[in-house]
Amino acid sequence: MTTATVAGTITDLMWSETASIYDAILAHPFIKGLTSGDLDRSAFEFYTVQDALYLKDYARALSLAAVKAPDEETIILFNEHSKGCLVEERAMQKNFFDVFGLSAEQVWATPKAPACQAYTSYLLSVAYARPFHEVVAVVLPCYWIYWEVGKALAEKGSPDPMYQQWIDTYAGEEFAEAVVAVLEITNRVARGLPDVDRAAMLHHYVTTSRYEWMFWDMGYRKEAWPV
């Protein structure tokens, strides 16, 4: 399966506008450490806990996309994806937490790191307040960038079984199908919109793409509140 972009579509524009961000993500030591196996396990633990906190709010954002969706099929799709965040991805995380010796109570009692707090706050503010086409754009990077990263890392593999499991999840066919479906929705909803609305979609996509880089950087540094 290939990335669902067509020249002239909004997703084509989105990817070209964030190519440097994607390159920076692939070059980040957190991402490179997954395939080399050199990533400090404590950094991956920190990231995984924060990702669990993030996914709870991301699932809420996807449910809000379903609320605002224009047709029944799209309502069903985003509700299913919201459930997937809290079931399939959490099952993977639970495997990791078992290895780390973390209980569910410990995970949910963890405060959000600054980047996680900022990302989820922005995500939910758009999801609650803005129209459907903007909500689709704001949630898209978490789909699309993870898929592209998963595919890129799958070509190299990892000597660490835990890191390989993470890579396989996002490089897998099931996740690919979900991403392609959302890319198609993004292109469809943007078709015929006024330039100002397409600009808003692009703004949200670029912003949350930046947050994706920040999230992995947060994990690598085990980011704490400075005061």
Image (tube, rainbow, N blue to C red):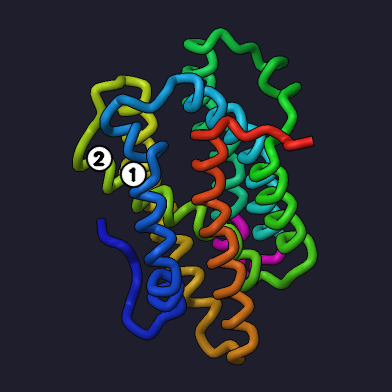
Q: Residue furthest front?
A: 227
- Residue at 63% x, 78% y is 200
Callout 2, which amino acid? Answer: Ala
Type of amino acid at the residue the image marks with label 1: Gly
Q: Residue at x 59, y 90 (%)?
A: 195
Contact flag, marks 2 and 1 (Cβ < 8 Å): yes
The N terminus: image quadrant: bottom left
Q: Position of residue 61 (x, y in %)?
A: 68, 52
Query: Most extreme residue toward the left, as rendered?
Result: 155
Which numbered tag is attached to residue 150?
A: 1
Q: Position of residue 201 (x, y in %)?
A: 59, 74
Please give the residue where the numbered disc 2 appears in the rendered image.
Answer: 154
- In the figure, 173 relative to 108: above or below? below
| Disc 1 secondary structure class | helix
Tell me the CA gap for discs 2 and 1. 6 Å
Helix, strand or loop for disc 2: helix
Q: Which residues are magenta?
A: 68-76
Quadrant in the picture for residue 179? bottom left
